[in-house]
Amino acid sequence: MYWSCDWKIAMLYFLAVMNMYQFNQIKCYLYFNNNAKLPINMDDKLYKIQMVYNLNAVCWCLMNNLGEQILIDEDMMKWREG
């Protein structure tokens, strides 16, 4: 849907930056983890990108010091537990 021609759902930023063919070419060769080392019974949906996710989380925390202005509600906790 990022490259849709329908003006109601089109994402103009994506259309301006790269076309769908270029995105698919990058996506074909972009790997963050070795599938051969993937555990057999892996339920963690973020396993393949866990290293990149953790790095981004650390950088985000370093750049965004929210202090007392952060709020965690019960819906966020339910998502993390499940």
Image (spheres, rainbow, N blue to C red):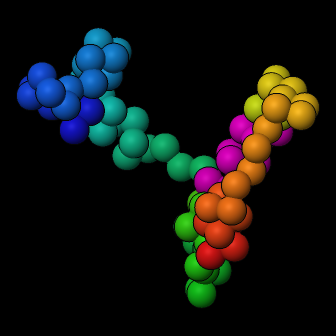
58 relative to 2 in the view: left or right: right
Q: Image quadrant of residue 66?
A: top right
31 relative to 80 in the view: left or right: left
Q: Is residue 32 above or below residue 66?
A: below
- Which secondary structure class fits the magenta region best? helix
**x and y percentages locating residue 72 in the rendered image:** 74, 50
**x and y percentages locating residue 41 in the rendered image:** 60, 87
Looking at the figure, which quarter contains the N terminus?
top left
Closest to the observer: 38 or 3? 3
Highlighted magenta segment, given as a residue range? 49-59
Q: Is residue 8 magenta?
A: no
Residue shown at 90%/32% (left/top)? 67
Looking at the figure, which quarter contains the C terminus?
bottom right
Q: Is residue 78 visible?
A: yes
Residue shown at 49%/43% (left/top)? 30
Q: Is residue 31 above or below residue 78?
A: above
Q: Is residue 18 visible?
A: no
**x and y percentages locating residue 63 in the rendered image:** 82, 23
Closest to the observer: 36 or 7? 7
Closest to the observer: 17 or 71? 71
**x and y percentages locating residue 55 in the rendered image:** 77, 41
